Amino acid sequence: MWNYEKRLEFPVNITKPSAMLAQAIISQYGGPDGEMGASMRYLSQRYACPYREVSAILTDIGTEELAHLEMVATIVHQLTRNLSMEEIEDSGFTNYYVDHTIGIWPQAASGMPFSAAQFQSIGDIITDLTEDMAAEQKARTTYDNILRLVRDDPDVCEPIKFLRAREIVHFQRFGEALRIVQDRLNEKNFYAFNPGFDCTK
């Protein structure tokens, strides 16, 4: 059960519209390394996790990713809410506009729609946590790319910097979770067909 506070995790107050930036930043809403996939990944993986404290880390981070999804949606909304038709046409935003007007819809910067195929939940905690660490690094890299594009707009830059910093913290927490799992396993191995863990016998 979660308590929801009706405020963003970091304030977003963008005054200057930019369809070009919106088209790039929307990738962190529904792109291959975006916040939607991250939240679904971690909140799905938590159920097969054999250790409560590691499951709690997955829950905490998965929940925070939902807050990041809300921030990214707010950024995209504020970048597009006051666009003129001329700005929409000049920026190449017309294809998105035809399908969604200026509604928020999960897709990558390339236009590829979000799909559950973009994330994995395999049920082996070592495999899942290793993927989670890689996912956080890919998200951090995407935010690095976005920061190169928004460097001249502090209203956009500051919330993106905040999101990037949280990806680093999540990477570190998943590293801690993996160490917890490895310490619990000792000399044993959690992989399939290990007699100490395999339930198919």
Image (spheres, helix red, strand yellow):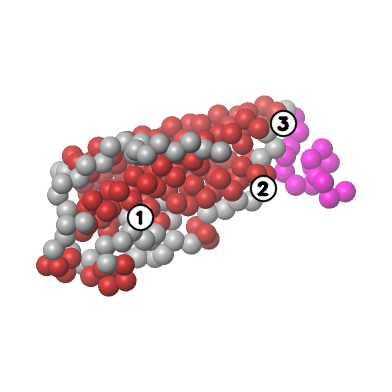
Looking at the image, tell me whether mark 2 or mark 3 is earlier in sequence order. 2
Q: Residue at x 37, y 46 (%)?
A: 70
Q: Secondary structure at mark 2?
A: loop
Residue 77 location (% of width, % of height): 27, 53
Q: Label 3 belongs to which residue?
A: 185
Q: Residue at x 35, y 65 (%)?
A: 111
The rendered magenta stretch, by its main secondary structure, is classed as loop
Q: Label 1 belongs to which residue?
A: 27
Whether residue 189 is in magenta: the answer is: yes
Q: Picture quarter containing residue 47?
A: top right
* Other-residue count near label 1 (Cα within 10 Å), few / some / many at <14 / 14–19 / ≥20: many
User: Spatial distance from mark 2 to mark 3, Cα to Cα?
Assistant: 16 Å
Kind of residue sitting beneath label 1: Ser
Residue 139 located left or right of residue 151: right
Q: Which residues are magenta?
A: 187-201
Question: Disc number at residue 126?
Answer: none
Kind of residue sitting beneath label 3: Leu
Looking at the image, tell me whether mark 2 or mark 1 is earlier in sequence order. 1
Front-most of residues 148 and 72: 72
Residue 161 location (% of width, % of height): 29, 37
* Residue furthest to the right: 201
Question: Disc number at residue 123?
Answer: 2
Residue 73 located left or right of residue 35: left
Q: Residue at x 26, y 41 (%)?
A: 12
Q: Picture quarter containing residue 46?
A: top right
CB contact under 8 Å: marks 2 and 3: no
Front-most of residues 74 and 201: 74
